[in-house]
Amino acid sequence: MDDAVFLGGGGPDYGTKQGLSLKYANRHGLVAGATGTGKTVTLQILAEGFSAAGVPVFMADVKGDLSGLAKSGSAEHKLHAPFTERAATIGFADYTYAAFPVTFWDLFGEQGHPVRTTVSEMGPLLLSQLLALSEPQEGILNIAFRLADEEGLPLLDLKDLQALLIWIGENASELSLRYGNVAPASIGAIQRRLLVLENQGGAKLFGEPALDLADLMRCDAEGRGMVNILASDQLMGAPKLYATFLLWLLSELFEELPEVGDPDKPKLVFFFDEAHLLFDDAPKALVNKVEQVARLIRSKGVGVYFVTQNPADVPDDILGQLGNRVQHALRAFTGKDRKELRLAAQTYRENPAFDTETAIREVGVGEAVTSMLQKKGVPGIVERTLIRPPSSQLGPITPEERAGVMGTSTMAGKYDQTLDRTSAFEILRERAAKAAADAAKAEEQAEEAEAPAARDFNAGRRYSGSRVTRSTSRETRASTSFGDQMTKMVVKELTGTTGRRIVRGILGGLFKGR
C-alpha cells in the first residue's frame, strides 16, 4: 500500500486489508471507542504511516504514551511480544521496528519546546469562549481590541492587555458614550476569571517569539514527516485552555495556508484528541465556525481527525464530513448507550457479511470496525479490522530520553527564551512618563509665576486695595486628547501599588476577527 497508510485487517476472522488512502486523507476522519479499547495505538500507527509517507503530523499526547514514537520498538519489550504474531496474522510482511522524527511541544515549556502566540493573534472571540463570558463581557473585550487598533498599541503579552483593561475600568462612563454600556461589574467579572486562568498557567501561552506554523510542517533529512507532539497531560487540568488552544491552532492553519485543491497527500494531518471538550457547552456560533473550518480547510491540504470516546460527542454536521473512520468498541449497558451504538452503526456503509451494530459492540482490544474512503471519495464498505502493530515503542519514553530528543531538535533554542519587545505596555509607559514630566514642568512654571503674583497682591492691598486673581497650574494645562487621557490614567494605575499586577486575559478570536 504505497499510496496509503496501512491499518490492518486480514486473517480468517477479518475482512480485506484496510488502508487510509493518502489522496483522501485530507477528507478528515474519526477515531472513536471506549476507554481501553486501543485508540492510542491506532493514533500511533496512523502517525507512523503518515510520517513514513512524508506527511507531517500534529497530535496532542493526553496520557504521555505517544512519546514512544521517538524510540524504536523491540522484541524484548514486554508489550511488543505479541506483535510479531499479529503481523503474521494480518500479512504484514514488511513489519520492522523503527523510531520516527519527533518534536516535543508544551504550552508550559516543561516537557517540550514552548508554544506561544500573541494576544492579538488570539483575539476576543476565543477568549470569551475560554472564559465563558456573557455577551456584555465579550463586548468589553472587543472594545479593548478596538482601542488597541485605534491607538496603535500592539497586544503581545498579558501586561499589554492589562494596561487597556485598567484604562477601560477607570473611564467606563466616557467609553459608554462611544461604544455602549461598559459596566465596571462586568470588568470585575472578567478580571476574576482571568485570574483563575493565569493561576492555571495560561499566561505562559502569550508572548514572543510566537509559533511559526512552518515549524509544524517539516520533514527530516530522510523525507519523513515530522511528528509534532503536544504534551497535554498537565494541560488537561485546564480542559478549556486545551480545547481553545487547539481550535486556535486549527484556525491559524486555515487562515495562513494557501489553497492547494486536492493534493496527492496532505500537507499536514491534525489530530484533535478528546474532541468532546471542544463541543461541550459550546455556543452555536462557535460550533458553526468549527464546521466551516472542517469543510474548507481540506482545500488547504490539512486533514483533521477527531478522537473521542463516542461519535455522538461530535455534532452531526461535522460528523458527516469525517469520511475515514476507525471505530473501536462501544459499550452498551444502558438504554442511552444502546441508542448511541445503533446511531453509530447507521453511519457506516453496510457489509452483508456481518451486523455492524453487533460488531462495534463485540470487537476486542486492538480490533476495530473501519471504513475508509475509496476511489472518487466514496465511503468503503465497513470491515472488521485487526489493527497492525506499531513499529515504535508502545508506551512513554523516559524523561532523560525526552530531554535528549529536545536537545538535538532543530527547534532547540528558537523558542526557549522569551522576547519582550516594545508593545502596548511599553508604549503606554513611555507616554505616561512624558505626560508626567510635562505635568511636573507645568506645575513648576505655575509655582514660579506665583511669587510675582503674590508681591503684586500685597502691593495692591497696601496702595489700591485691589484684588488680584491667583493663577493655578490647572489653568495652564492644555486640553487633552483621547490618547493623552488614556496615557494619564494608565500611568496613574501602573505607578500605584494596586496597578502593578492586575488580572488580564487570554485567547479570543476565530478567523482573525481583529
Image (tube, rainbow, N blue to C red):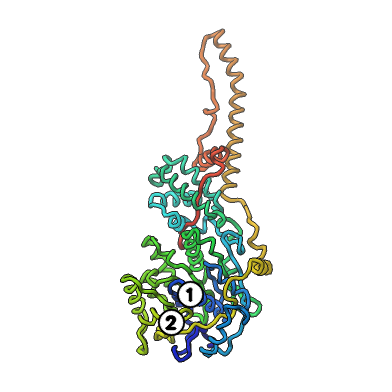
Image point 44% across, 64% down: which residue? 277
Measured as percent of width and height from the top left, residue 319 is found at 39, 73
The image shows residue 510 at horizontal and vertical percentages of 45, 61
The amino acid on which the numbered mark 2 sits, given as a three-letter code, is Thr
Residue 54 at least partly seen: no
In the rendered image, the vertical position of residue 133 relative to residue 470, given as above or below? below
Point out the frontmost of discs 2 and 1. 1
The kind of secondary structure element at disc 1 is: helix
Query: Picture coordinates of residue 452 (x, y %)?
Result: 61, 18
Q: Which mark is residue 192?
A: none
Where does label 2 land, which residue?
Answer: 370
Viewed as shown, does residue 407 lie left or right of 344?
Answer: right
Q: Position of residue 155 (x, y in %)?
A: 54, 52
Q: Residues within 10 Å of mark 2 (few under 14, many from 20)?
A: many
* Residue farthest to the bottom, as pictured: 12
Q: Residues within 10 Å of mark 1 (few under 14, many from 20)?
A: many
| Element carrying mark 2 | strand
Residue 414 vertical position relative to residue 451 in the rendered view, above or below: below
| Residue at (50% x, 77% y) in the render | 42
Which quarter of the picture shows residue 414?
Answer: bottom right
Instruction: Give 330 or 369, whichever is nearer the viewer.
Output: 330
State the residue in front, 43 or 261: 43
Q: Is residue 408 left or right of residue 306?
A: right
Q: Earlier in the sequence, mark 2 or mark 1?
A: 1
Disc 1 marks which amino acid? Answer: Lys
Disc number for residue 39? 1
* Foreground pick, 346 / 87: 87
Using the rendered image of the protein, determine whether residue 387 is visible from the camera's viewpoint.
yes
Q: Report, in whole angstroms, how far the alpha carbon at label 2 lies from the one at label 1.
A: 13 Å
